[in-house]
Image (cartoon, rainbow, N blue to C red):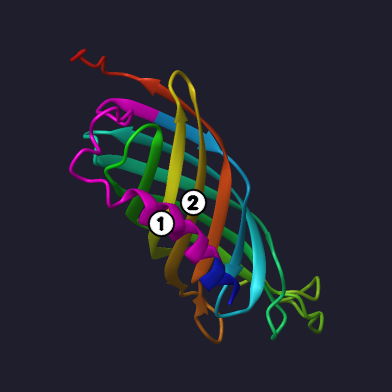
Amino acid sequence: MKRIIIFTLLLIPFGQYAQDTQDGTRNRYVHTGIFCADVSIAPGFLVNQNISTISIPAGIEFYMDPHVSFKADVYYHVTSGLTSDSLRLTANHQLLCGAAYHFTTRGYFDPYFAFQPGVSYGQVTPENKLPRTTDTPNGTVDYNANLAPILGLSLGFNYYFPRFFHIFVEATYVHGTLLYNAPAAFPLDELKIQFGLGWNLNLIKQKKA
């Protein structure tokens, strides 16, 4: 239910501005050559395990066109809760690279949708203590860390202040599965939410009309 409410709230401004397509480019700030960067904190929710996560995302973006940009994001996994079978996701560092489509609007408001394939470096550790043996001298076992292909779909918006700053809100759904030397695969499907203040520069000077 929380996920439905979050995505509904994100869609409200899209419905307000997406209809303005015929005259939307007039007085529009978004243009070719904008370079953006941001760092924030992203709470998340692993949907299959019903546990929360926290990660630190950092992203860059370059507008190749007023409607299309290259977008890359790195997520540094900080912590997560325990699953029902006492497993903890101790690593889930992610790299997502792809493209974003920016809807036509007026002014400084910039709603977008992003499609980003990527990779995750993940590791799962059981929390239950095991008998001390030569294989588990500390009473624990760490399953091998491994790489897993992932896919991220994002919906969000920026609001630009013309010179150097913008505020942003983004919801990202990441799909993937971690395969490793454990009894079962670990689904990585996760909903992440992030918002904050970003930086932007105009790398290509716009011609005055």
Of residue 112 and residue 208, the one placed in the foreground of this image is: 208
- Residue 131's spot in the image, x, y percent? 81, 84
Would residue 175 appear left or right of 134 to someone viewing this image? Answer: left
- Which is more N-terminal, label 2 or label 1? 1
Give the residues in magenta: 6-35
Q: Which class describes the residues within 10 Å of circle 2: few (<14), some (14-19), or many (20+)?
A: many
Indicate the quadrant where residue 138 lies: bottom right
Q: Residue at x 26, y 14 (%)?
A: 205
Of residue 126 and residue 200, the one placed in the foreground of this image is: 200
Mark 2 lies on residue:
170
Amino acid on which the number 1 mark rests in the picture: Ser
Quadrant in the picture for the N terminus:
bottom right
Magenta stretch encompasses residue 51: no
Q: Are marks 1 and 2 in contact (CB under 8 Å)?
A: yes
Mark 1 lies on residue:
154
- Residue 183's spot in the image, x, y percent? 55, 87
Compared with 134, 115 (above or below) is: above
Dot 1 falls on a residue whose secondary structure is strand
Amino acid on which the number 2 mark rests in the picture: Glu
**In this rendering, does residue 209 appear at all?**
yes
Of residue 199 and residue 29, the one placed in the foreground of this image is: 29
